């Protein structure tokens, strides 16, 4: 438990106890607020060092755009384009940074397999469909994995 969580817990606990002396119903409402604040702080702590590297095809289908939309630096990024037998490495990408890799010709459909590490050395691997004929991003997919599924 970090410093911010302890502060919220102590201040929230004192507020709940004070409100319980006035009206127990208000104390229950304050308890719900304290629980929500604690959960929010826990989620923020989990996503503090989380790089999220994605690969997509540019509009002209001649470039692979690799971007880091996470909250931490991604290191040792390796991208393999299947079935084109094209591979390339990127040393690192900071949050909200992009890298473009030019291809010799246009591609209509492929898959990018991306492997990378965070600053603590934890490895991640994801694959992305690359298509020139339509959008491949799922807008309903959450930005950060839910329930710790990384």
Image (spheres, rainbow, N blue to C red):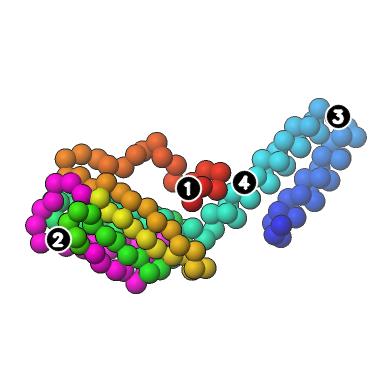
Badge 3 vs badge 4, beta-carbon distance below 8 Å: no
Secondary element at image label 1 = loop
Q: CA distance from mark 3 to mark 2?
A: 68 Å
- Residue designated by label 2: 103
Image: magenta residue range: 87-110
Secondary element at image label 3 = loop
- Residue designated by label 1: 144
**Which tag, 3 or 4, sits closer to the chain's start?**
3
Residue at point 59%, 49% (across, down): 43
Percent across and percent down for residue 36 are 66, 40
Q: Is residue 41 left or right of residue 57?
A: right
Residue at point 25%, 50% (across, down): 111
**Which tag, 4 or 1, sits closer to the chain's start?**
4
Badge 1 vs badge 2, beta-carbon distance below 8 Å: no
**Which tag, 3 or 1, sits closer to the chain's start?**
3
1 vs 2, front mark:
2
Percent across and percent down for residue 37 are 67, 44
**Which tag, 1 or 2, sits closer to the chain's start?**
2
Residue 63 visible in the current orientation = no
Residue count near mark 1 (Cα–Cα under 10 Å), binned few <14, some 14–19, many ≥20 = some
Q: Residue 90 is drawn in which quadrant? A: bottom left
Badge 3 vs badge 1, beta-carbon distance below 8 Å: no
Work out whether residue 100 or residue 78 is closer to the camera in this orientation and state it: 78
Work out whether residue 8 or residue 83 is closer to the camera in this orientation and state it: 83
Residue count near mark 2 (Cα–Cα under 10 Å), binned few <14, some 14–19, many ≥20 = few
2 vs 4, front mark:
2
Percent across and percent down for residue 86 are 20, 62
Residue at point 23%, 57% (across, down): 81
- Residue designated by label 3: 23
């Amino acid at each position: 438990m970090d410093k911010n969580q302890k502060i919220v817990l102590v201040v929230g606990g004192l507020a709940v106890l004070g409100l319980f002396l006035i009206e127990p119903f208000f104390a229950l409402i304050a308890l719900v607020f304290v629980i929500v604040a604690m959960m929010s702080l826990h989620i923020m702590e989990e996503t503090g060092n989380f790089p999220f590297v994605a690969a997509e095809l540019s509009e002209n289908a001649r470039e692979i755009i690799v971007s880091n939309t996470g909250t931490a630096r991604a290191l040792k990024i390796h991208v393999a384009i299947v079935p084109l037998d094209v591979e390339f490495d990127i040393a690192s990408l900071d949050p909200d940074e992009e890298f473009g890799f030019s291809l010799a010709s246009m591609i209509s459909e492929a898959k990018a397999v991306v492997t990378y590490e965070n600053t603590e050395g934890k490895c991640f691997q994801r694959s992305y469909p690359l298509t020139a004929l339509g959008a491949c991003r799922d807008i309903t997919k959450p930005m950060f994995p839910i329930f710790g599924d990384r």
